Image: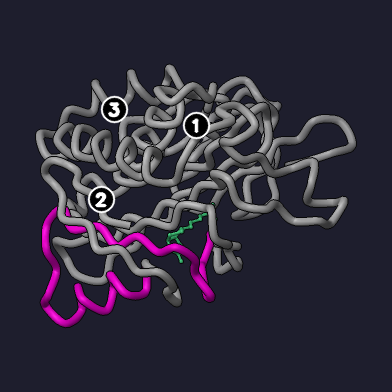
Amino acid sequence: MELLVPGWRVEWLPIATSTNDLALERIRAGRAEDRVALIAGEQVSGRGRPGRVWRSPPGSLSLTAMLPFWPERAGWAALAAGIAAATAARELGAPTGLKWPNDLLLDGRKLGGVLVESCAPRWIAVGIGINVINSLPEEEELRGRVARLAEAIPDVTVEQVARGVLLWLDVTWGWLAEARMDRLRASWEELDRTTGRTVRWSRDGSLGVAAGLDETGGLRIRREDGSVETALVGEVTFVAGPTEN
Ligand code: BTN
């Protein structure tokens, strides 16, 4: 696949271990390059958060962008990537939303996710995985929890999705560079499928109701006693009666 996207240099790899690992190696070796994206046709050791395996069969999008990073805005970096991916999916016709910090949801099921990793003060590897036209897991337990873009957009291609994600990543990273948190917040709020849900925070298993973002991009969680704590690390699962996702 040859992909020409204004502002980007795309390296296409038919098969890779993990595009995040490859990007991190380059960053560590001092070979980071702004707006270079590695895209793999499939990954054999794709990684999810936190430390999970990420399935990346042919027909899915596995993309890692090397981008500049501002540690003082670390909490917004992951959100900027999620906004870009969700907006690209919406523009193609899939009504995608976000679960904090950066799961992409389609019809309440997981369409994709973001894994941002930094190993140098000023560079970050922004990994995005999206189910596009790939096969989904057969296991009954997983089938009801995952989605792919082809459900909403029958003729979608991986190239189309990659192009849209990169074009939007350029926009949201521009907002991050200029510290336009107001823009990031407004976009995130439009895509937000987290606020108002009862959530369990992975850090300590505690429960609360998600109450929007704080000024660092963390998720406010309102406890039963009315107190509010901000989740800055980890992730949340939705608690809805007997099932969680
Ligand atoms: C998640 O757990 O939701 C995050 C998934 C991130 C997967 C992407 S695919 C491209 C990049 N390379 C990886 O190994 N992981 C990320």
The magenta stretch spans which residues? 20-49
Instruction: Note whether 55 is above or below 92 in the view shown.
Output: below
Question: Looking at the image, do the residues carrying marks 3 and 2 touch, with CB atoms under 8 Å apart?
Answer: no
Task: Indicate which disc, 1 or 2, sits on the residue closer to the N terminus.
Answer: 2
Q: Which residue is located at x 15 percent, y 49 percent?
A: 8
| Number of the label disc, if any, that sits on residue 220 | 1
Q: Which residue is located at x 56 percent, y 36 percent?
A: 149
Task: Indicate which disc, 3 or 2, sits on the residue closer to the N terminus.
Answer: 2
| Number of the label disc, if any, that sits on residue 3 | 2
Quarter of the C terminus within the rendering: top right
Left or right relative to 38: residue 127: right
Left or right relative to 49: residue 139: right
| Badge 1 amino acid | Arg
Q: Nearer the viewer, residue 158 or 225?
A: 158
Whether residue 76 can be seen here? no
Q: Estimate how packed mark 1 is, as few (under 14), some (14 to 19) or many (20 or more) residues with alpha carbons within 10 Å.
A: many
